[in-house]
Amino acid sequence: MGRISRTIELAKASWQVLKADKELIILPILSLVATMAVAASFLAPILLSGEGTNIEDPGTVGYVLLFVAYVVLAFITIFFNAALVHAANERLDGGDPTIGSALRGAAGRVHRILPWALVSATVSIVLRAIEERAGIVGRIVSGIAGIAWSLVTFLVIPVLVIEDIGVVDAVKRSGAMFKRTWGENMASQVGFGLLGFLAMLPALLIGAAAVAAGGAVAFFGIVVAVLWVLTVAMVLSALSGIFQTALYRYAAGMDTGTAFGSQDLGAAFAPKAGGRSGGFGGGIIGG
């Protein structure tokens, strides 16, 4: 419970940053809208093409379109996450970011974002292939590998945006940071997931009650529930990006700003008593 409570405190600090720049919530919304539009634009030709109607074997055209779709969707997600990281980093530097400055910052890193999108899409496709072709064992292996990949690459986007280095070096840098904080890093991500579940729980209850009532009440209740879930998802996405940026800055020995005191981050990512010395900051900064 100690780790979860510290994650809640860090989420509160992230909330303070988000309150100072409420417009940052627009970035996850733009990402969602762009993702839906692009997904629809790719889905139509896949379904309309003669080869794309077979789900089991979409054919050459279908596979090419699916790969391109994976890359484009990954690029959109990474681009807007990079914009959020850029804005959060500007705020933690004492600046006053805007949507325009965030988007310009991400656009200035397109040469880093595109290769990372290619890598991310390829990894996703490989994991999906393992899951689909190797039965229950494949699903287990794919699930474990997917979790490990997401944890090790947790700080890749801040590294790409702030340090402006290549994808290979960024993955190595993120992995080096993760090795010193694997337990606390996992606890933080689980903590944000728990916060999201608790925040969405009222929407699920409203939706269930509305469906049980039936009629117009069901329609209205479902709309409210969907809007609630989307709002929570967008807020949590923004908070996660802010937290991710602050964590990177702490790991890199940079000032984390007034909202993130070094004591909070140090407590959340310090090594266990009796464990290895050096900790998160010490291992990176002193290395």
Image (tube, grey):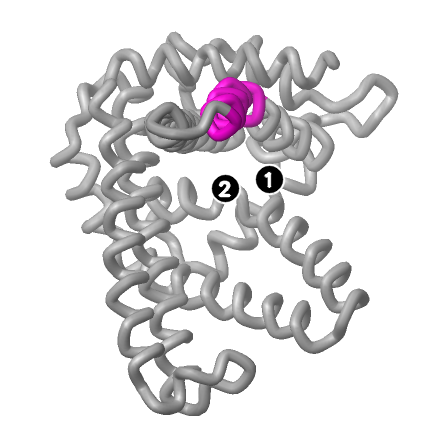
Q: Is residue 177 above or below residue 145?
A: above
Q: Is residue 200 magenta?
A: yes
Q: Is residue 61 magenta?
A: no
User: Is the Cβ of the residue at disc 1 closer than 8 Å to that at disc 2?
Assistant: yes
Query: In the image as oriented, which residue stretches furthest toward the right?
Result: 274
Q: Residues within 10 Å of mark 2 (few under 14, many from 20)?
A: many
Quadrant of the drawing holding the C terminus: top right
Q: Is residue 250 visible?
A: no
Q: Is residue 151 above or below residue 121?
A: above
Q: Nearer the viewer, residue 207 or 181?
A: 207
Q: Nearer the viewer, mark 1 or mark 2?
A: 2
Q: Nearer the viewer, residue 57 or 38?
A: 57
Coordinates of residue 46 in the picture (x, y in percent): 34, 78
Which residue occupies 47% across, 23% down?
213
In this picture, residue 39 sits left or right of residue 261? left
Quadrant of the drawing holding the N terminus: top right
Residue identifier under label 1: 177
In this picture, residue 19 sits left or right of residue 211? left
Residue identifier under label 2: 155
Query: In the image as oriented, which residue stretches furthest toward the left?
Result: 100
Q: Give the residues drawn in magenta, as a range.
A: 195-212
Q: The residue under label 2 is which amino acid type? A: Leu
Coordinates of residue 216 in the picture (x, y in percent): 33, 27
Q: Is residue 149 above or below residue 54?
A: above
Which residue occupies 39% across, 61% down?
117
Number of callouts: 2
Which residue occupies 70% across, 37% down?
182
Q: Is residue 261 above or below residue 70?
A: above
* Mark 2 element type: loop
